[in-house]
Amino acid sequence: MGNEKLVEKLVQSGVDLSQPRQADHWIYFNTKRERGLFLAYAEKEGLKLEAKKYSASSALPYSLQISRKDKVDLSSTTAITLRMRRKSKELDGDYDGWETFVVESK
């Protein structure tokens, strides 16, 4: 799902886009080395490793799940995801997108 659709869903759910919140990102790679290079880049950018996995049945078997607290308005998410897409492409990887959680008040 694109940034626009995710942000629209957040707005419809009543999320305050002016407040930073954890956003998780997924990126996939051909090799363990490429994944490691991207992780080093991500950590320098202040992102935290949530998970790294290997799936032999996947076309891009080495995955990363990383996160950081960021604003999730359209302008902010577009800037962040553009940088991640460019860096992952530079390393022959594929940036698959992001998500955040909506906590409903009772």
Image (tube, rainbow, N blue to C red):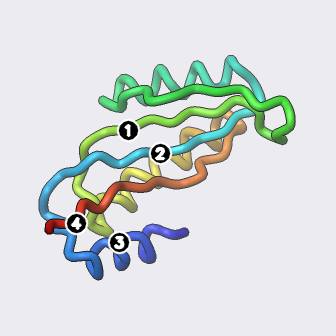
Q: Specify which label sits upstream in the sequence, 2 or 4.
A: 2
Q: Specify which label sits upstream in the sequence, 3 or 2.
A: 3
Residue 31 at what x, y percent from top left?
Answer: 75, 24
The local secondary structure at tag 2 comes to strand
Please tell me how crowded label 4 is: few (under 14), some (14-19), or many (20+) other residues with Cα within 10 Å: few
Task: Tell whether 39 sits left or right of 23.
Answer: right
Disc 1 to disc 4, C-alpha distance: 21 Å
Identify the residue at image location x=84%, y=30%.
56
Q: Which residue is labeled 1 in the image?
A: 67
Identify the residue at image location x=31%, y=72%.
10
Mark 3–mark 2 CB contact (< 8 Å): no
The amino acid type of the residue labelled 4 equals Glu
Residue 22 at what x, y percent from top left?
Answer: 29, 46
Q: Which mark's residue is nearer the viewer, 1 or 4?
A: 4
Q: Specify which label sits upstream in the sequence, 1 or 2.
A: 2
Identify the residue at image location x=58%, y=26%.
52
Identify the residue at image location x=32%, y=69%.
74
Q: Which residue is labeled 3 in the image?
A: 7
Disc assigned to residue 57: none
Q: Which residue is labeled 2 in the image?
A: 25
Disc assigned to residue 104: 4
Mark 1–mark 2 CB contact (< 8 Å): yes
The local secondary structure at tag 4 comes to loop
